[in-house]
Amino acid sequence: MKRFILLRLFQTIPVLIGITFIAFLLMMVTPGDPAEINLRAMMNTESPPKEAIEQMRMEMDLDKPWYIQYYSWLSRVLHGDLGYSYQTRKSTVEEILRAFPVTFLLSSIAMLFSIIIAIPIGILAGIHPNGKLDHLSRGISIIGLSIPDFFLGILGILIFSITLKILPVAGYKGPEYLILPAFALSISLFAVTMRLMRTSMAEELEQEYITTAISKGLDRGTIIRRHALKNAIVPVLTYMGTQYGWLFGGAMIIESLFALPGMGRLFVDAAASRDIMVMQACIMVFAIIFIIINLCIDISYYLLDPRMRDTHE
Amino acid sequence: MKWVKLFIFYGCILLLLCNVTAASSNILNVGGPWSPKTTDPHIDGYSYQRLGIIDTLVDVDQDAALIPGLATNWQVSGDQLTWTFTLRDGVVFHDKTPFTAAAMKKSLEDSLVKSKTFANVPIKEIKAPSDNILEIVLSTPFSGLPAYMAKGESGALSPDCIDQGDITRPIGTGPFIFESFTPKEEIRTVKNPNYWGKVPSVDGVVYTSIPDAVTRSMMLQSGEIDISLINPPEVTEKFQSMAGFTVKDQPIHRVRIMAYNCEEGPFTDKLVRQAINYAIDRQALVTYVMEGVGSPAASTFPPEFFWANKDLQPFPYNPDQAKSLLTQAGWTDSNNDGILDKNGEKFSITLLTYPERAELPPMAEVIQDQLKKVGIEVEIVVVDVDSSNARRNKGDFDIYLLGRGLLFTPDPDEVMMTDYHSSGTSGDGWCAYRWSNPEVDELIEKARGIIDPSARKSLYDRVQEIVVDEAPVSYLNYYVNQDIYSDRVKGYRMHPTELSYHLEEVSLS
């Protein structure tokens, strides 16, 4: 177990190097002097003196060849120094720390929605293929997949905020402000998860070992809970895991629609105003989230599927 | 049925979480697209100025002309190098310290360091010879100085506030006192009962930043906000007929123009440029692209503005006149293919524009169609705003379609210098390209040294007349801001240069 996790952690290192390099390249190819941007913030002035900029450039190794620049930038990043925002003159870390919890909560609630709703329905539909619930869930999935999330968001606002007046329209002043956006965000994930769970469950129930279990006289509930579900849920977990990463980075439209101050909006604003260091930081956060999720998926495989344990030990 | 129970359980939790607070009685809720970058007005002052937290020495009235603000009057010395501002008596900052010339000097000196607004203003020294006299000494004469003293970045902040260095609580003199700021979310203010001007009727203002206009309109409907700022026509259209809401229009300091390449290609010929002026149906652009919001433009400033030459009229749509001017310029359709030619060369041109202002690409298509009717073939190139400007600066275009802001500083000098003076048109920029006129140069330079606004205006009137006749650019239409507010709101007015929301004049019923 330990060895497996260590091995997987070790394997993420080249990926991390690749991502940091891409983020670093962004700074190289975008106009704007990072030394000057940092100094503007640190000295709180529009035009820092030339000598100070020169000094800063030397400290940041910006006068050196690119590989030394990269090394020096990477070591600054590892020390938590991601530079300053050109726009707000605040440290980039501060900006990220403000936006991260919002998106984290938003995508986690969206995830929770789809787990609570999609998995039970998917399982039931899979147990009774072509039953009433199966048809209903198929209908919901098709609708959910074809409606864009922002449209569903607007629809939700019209129903719950303007007509029923039980939820606020937009902004971020409390947890209730996340319900509608999380619901809108969860819909496409929810639709696919439900279908996947259904198919996977139905397929699993046709396997020979299930027939054996039935003929052995095990009751249906036990077969589904103890045998079929464990195997059927593996592909669903993979899908949901990778989708969590997408939810995280893909919340831009929903965050703008619902005026939530999260990572998506931070990234869009930074891109629009060419705020390089904030963009860099956002890219790295998105990438790291993906890596962590993939790691978690692998570990959950390991726990769920004994065959995986054999190949690694 | 276990999962049904689970469903109901979670449903109940969700409902418990939802306790939407009703809008409190006398707090004004405003929603707009922007969010201030910082809490330091000397870095980025417009939000704090608009919300009435800070005041400036000079104010701007409904005609975009300068009027007294914290300074009751100002004059310049004979050599035009020393500007003397007489400060208003009895003004106090929100922290109760008196507003004096020494405080203003300290505040302005902070602005000069922190803000890029004053980079081209030749300020040499600021002096405070007495409590209510402030002197600004320049290194070269500059008639635009008072206009810069109307910019938010020059706003008066209390000495204690400046001593914070990195200002997190702006303490100004305005009708509203800063309470809190959450980035990308909201600014809260409370009323200043000791304001020197009109004391606000509302107890406070909450400004919420909502980037999406559709979301803002829905918050207006649900009562979460009372005023929704800057709405596109597709949103306002719905509210025009809806009971309980008012849509207000305000022409602002921004005009859509087509700038011609006066260095190379067919538009080096003045007759051709004039012909285009007649070939464009300006009203159709407003009606079909802007959904009727806006008005055809006659010159660079909207007629509501003090600086506009009110004698100028928008060009009428007259394709026959356009064709005869083009014939006069030697462009005829000799091979009958529907496209004009001259010396064997087709009249085929490139129209450059950018998508960041969403209405420009559709407008380009209508223009393409209109020019085709007089026999001009137009290829539209839409690239992002920076790339389009880089192409323009290299001369890689025939017509550049753009939206041009005019009074970022409420004084015409800046825009005249960069857009029409030969020093501006010969370099990188946005407006007239490689066009110059010695009389225009002379008039603009002369106007820089004249202090009396009406005398200056007569010079700028003549400049506008020459530019319209020479047509290095064609003026299409003006931008109009549309705000929507609920019937609770009384006394709301919009500002032509967007320097203030005048929320102190608003009351809630």
Image (spheres, rainbow, N blue to C red):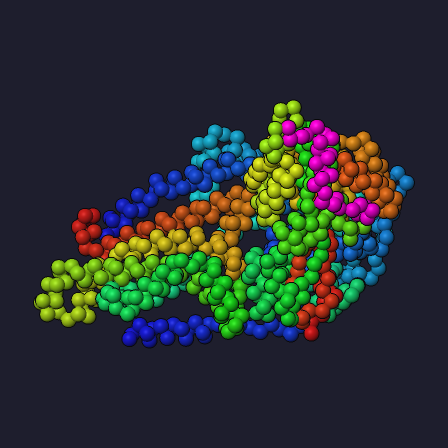
Q: Residue at x 78, y 65 (%)?
A: B198
Residue B90: % across, % down: 82, 62
Q: Which of A125/B38 is in front?
A: A125
Q: Is residue B132 left or right of residue B97?
A: right
Q: Quadrant of residue A122?
A: bottom left
> Is B313 contained in the magenta span?
yes
Could you tell me if residue A44 is visible in this image? yes
Q: Which of B477/A46 is in front?
A: B477
Residue B239: % across, % down: 62, 65
Q: Quadrant of residue B232?
A: bottom right
Q: Quadrant of the N terminus of chain B?
A: bottom left
Q: Is the residue B415 above or below the residue B499 in the image?
A: above
> Is A262 contained in the magenta span?
no
Could you tell me if residue B186 is visible in this image? no
Farthest-out residue, left? A216
Q: Which of B405/A307 is in front?
A: B405
Q: Residue at x 67, y 70 (%)?
A: B487
Q: Which residues are magenta?
A: B307-334
Q: Residue at x 64, y 42 (%)?
A: B370
Q: Is the residue B508 above or below the residue A211 in the image?
A: below
Q: Is residue A164 left or right of residue B36?
A: left
Q: Is the residue B311 above or below the residue B348 in the image?
A: below
Q: Residue at x 42, y 49 (%)?
A: A286
Q: Is the residue B418 above or below the residue B208 in the image?
A: above
Q: Quadrant of residue B174?
A: bottom right
Q: Quadrant of the C terminus of chain B?
A: bottom right
Q: Which of B297/B252 is in front?
A: B297
Residue A161: % across, % down: 52, 69
Farthest-out residue, top? B343
Principal SS element in the magenta part?
loop
